Amino acid sequence: MRFFALFLSVCCLCSTAMASEKSVTFCLDGALVESEAISRKGYLEVSLPGNLLPNSLRIKPLGSFEIRRVDLVAGKTDPKAGKEAAALAEKKHLLEDRLKALEAREAVFRAAAKSQSSKAPRKTKTNPEPMASIRKGTEFAIAQLEEVYHARRKAEAELASVEARLVALKKSGGIGGSVARVWTSSRDGRVRVSYILSGTGWSPIYNFRLAGDNKVEVAVLADIPSVGGTARVSLSTLAELSAPFSQLSSDGMAKVATYTLPLEKEQLGGGALSHLAFTFKNTSQQILPPGEAHCYLKGEYLGKARFERCKPDESRELVFGARD
């Protein structure tokens, strides 16, 4: 994956700025964690989280000594977290089975509705009102389908909640973590430890501001995941944006870049609530990654929309607000 190459690049850039405390550098598709540790009597242990990217662990001696051996063993699971994880795993399996059953039920009632609607009405002694019978059968099948759709949405929402909680437990180190056992040739050697956390990257947030001058100001912000403790946090945009590192503000947001881009089309619709549709061209020569977009027209907030990846010299249409 592209993150391995990114990891090496970030390591080179960060190596001159290491401090004794832990530092976390967020990228678009993960996070680089760095810290220093001291081996006592030629041995140390490093606790690693459950969402560690496989084979991303690096341990570098900071001095003229050798790292003789590194073993990875399963970390201790917090009993409370382990019990919760087991219950969540069981609930996840039940919800997955529920979704499979609903999928089969949907197929049955979908076929029944189609069968009823395709029947040719035939009046018989036992069925004097064929159209009424067909309509009744069709309405019953559709009603069952509505129940299936409702149950499926509920099950999918519960499944997403369960999976999110399992991920949170792994990130917190309660379950799924490991311990790196390190032996060195120095009794008190200092080492630098670095590794990558998968799925813990920053998310692009776009503010589009229009003032009616055939241009749009695009501010690219970074939504940063919360980091516990006293880690030094920074932002890398090497994955797709070539802006420099940025320190985060207290609200967890960082400004990555600001561009003024030309508008190719702008249409303001009327109605109870106005909507704005516009097309801009990316003349920044930077790839703008997908994210959440917010729009302001002469200072007025018009809502949000999904922004898809936009390459240099590409045009992209966005629509904000209610549209008739």
Image (cartoon, rainbow, N blue to C red):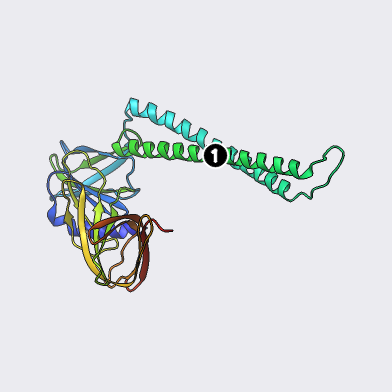
Q: Where is residue 54 in the image (x, y as percent from the top left)?
A: 35, 48
User: In the figure, is residue 161 to the left or right of 120?
Assistant: left
Q: Which of 16 and 267 is in front in this view?
A: 267
Q: Nearer the viewer, residue 134 or 318?
A: 134
Q: Position of residue 246 (x, y in %)?
A: 17, 56
Seen in the picture, residue 225 relative to 206 is either above or below; the reply is above
Seen in the picture, residue 281 relative to 140 is either above or below; the reply is below
Determine whether the residue tagged by mark 1 lies in a helix, strand or loop.
helix
The image quarter containing residue 77 is top left
Residue at figure coordinates x 74%, y 42% from the top left = 132
Seen in the picture, residue 280 relative to 132 is either above or below; the reply is below
User: In the figure, is residue 237 to the left or right of 313?
Assistant: left
Disc 1 marks a residue whose amino acid type is Leu
Q: Position of residue 197 (x, y in %)?
A: 30, 47
Q: Nearer the viewer, residue 124 or 161?
A: 124
Dot 1: within a 10 Å radius of its alpha carbon, few (fewer than 14), some, or many (20 or more) residues? many
Give the position of the C terminus as an image quadrant.
bottom left
Seen in the picture, residue 87 relative to 321 is either above or below; the reply is above
Report the number of numbered marks.
1
Residue at figure coordinates x 33%, y 43% from the top left = 51
Residue highlighted by disc 1: 99
Give the position of the N terminus as an image quadrant.
bottom left
The image quarter containing residue 220 is bottom left
